[in-house]
Amino acid sequence: MEYIILAVALVGIVFGADYLVAGAVSIARRLKVSDFVIGAAIVGVGTSMPELVVSFIGALQGNADVAIGNVVGSNIFNVLGILGLTAMFFPITVNRSNMKFELPVCIAVSLLLTVLVFNFFTGGTPVVSRPDGLILLVCFFGFMWYSFHRDRKAGGQVSEQTALEEEKTPLWLAVVKVVGGLTVLIVSCDLFVDNAVRIARSFGVNDAFISLTLIACGTSLPELAASVAAALKKNTQLALGNIIGSNIFNITWILGLSSQVMPLNSSGITAVDYCVMIVAAVIPIILGIKGRIGRASGTFMFIGFIAYTWYLLSTQIG
């Protein structure tokens, strides 16, 4: 029965993401927002709702491995898995703005989280404390404000495809698509994660492994569906923005908010996992130096994700 629910949930995730992307693009076009900012600030936040729900519940239940592992694993999967897989079929454009601001911010918050977790300045048990969480929340609001401010100042870069969609879609329908798509996404993702965890626990694996793999990949399925949907519409800037925005949102907003519920003391998520997350954040800025992430680069990234998953599996078996 669990496998049937998994299949149904996956279908719901795909359709929900498609409606969310279409509605968000239409609304943002009316506000003269660029494709990248739509992906980073609107679609990225929307598709990260499942991570927020899972990490928040993990914090409420005192399970820091789930709260933190979900975010770390999702960020790794978003870049190496989703961005890599998308680039394998739809080469992704990386513009000068991405290289100067959004990608460096993603790297910076990944490094910041690692510094805060391991208390590099004070020492002690790995933890995301309430003061640490407040720092992350300030970073989130700062990123959101500056993204919209800079985009408005630049006038926004509107793609021809999305401009045509704006003219065809009534505002009320766009709002219905966003709300309906996001609702379907969250419900479907919740079903997917619950059943995936049940199946995994029947094989006797621990919470850290489950959160870094099954929960992380399950809650990131909206990002996968949204990125593929955007790429199929030939809007790779929205796809890139979705991934980068989601990763920044995961660290700053989700862990910042979750740590206010309860300090997140996590021993199951190791330094290796944080290092892989940082490397994953650095890779797009290196591979995109020539203005695009091509099929070969996408393949390299996806192989990296497979290798990391294999490492986690080998340590679990060992």
Image: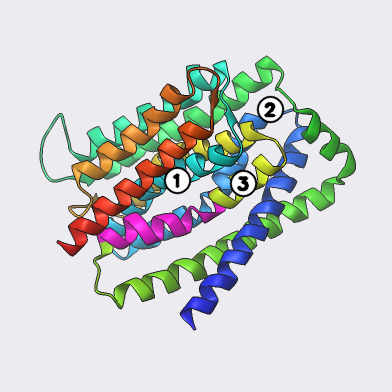
Residue at 57% from the left image edge and 65% from the top image edge: 10
Question: Which of the two discs, 2 and 3, labels the residue nearer the N terminus?
Answer: 2
Q: Is residue 30 visible?
A: no
Depth check: 242 or 303 in front?
303
Crowdedness of circle 3 by 10 Å Cα count: few (<14), some, many (20+)?
Answer: many
Q: Is residue 127 left or right of residue 6?
A: left
Secondary structure state at the residue bearing disc 3 = helix
Residue at 18% from the left image edge and 38% from the top image edge: 118
Q: Is residue 241 left or right of residue 301?
A: right
To which residue does mark 2 refer? Answer: 34
Question: Marks 2 and 1, how far apart in space?
Answer: 25 Å
Crowdedness of circle 1 by 10 Å Cα count: few (<14), some, many (20+)?
Answer: many
Depth check: 156 or 140 in front?
156
Asked whether residue 188 is drawn in magenta, I would say no
What amino acid type is highlighted by mark number 2?
Answer: Ser
What amino acid type is highlighted by mark number 3?
Answer: Val
Give the vertical position of 193 relative to 24 (above or below). below
Rendered location of residue 49, percent (x, y): 52, 53
To which residue does mark 3 refer? Answer: 228
Q: Which residues are magenta?
A: 208-223
Give the dominant element type of the magenta stretch: helix, strand or loop: helix
Depth check: 78 or 33 in front?
78
To which residue does mark 1 refer? Answer: 81
Rendered location of residue 12, percent (x, y): 63, 65
Residue at 58% from the left image edge and 31% from the top image edge: 92
Circles 2 and 3, Cβ within 8 Å, touching? The answer is: no
What amino acid type is highlighted by mark number 1?
Answer: Gly
Look at discs 2 and 1 and give the one toward the viewer.
Answer: 1
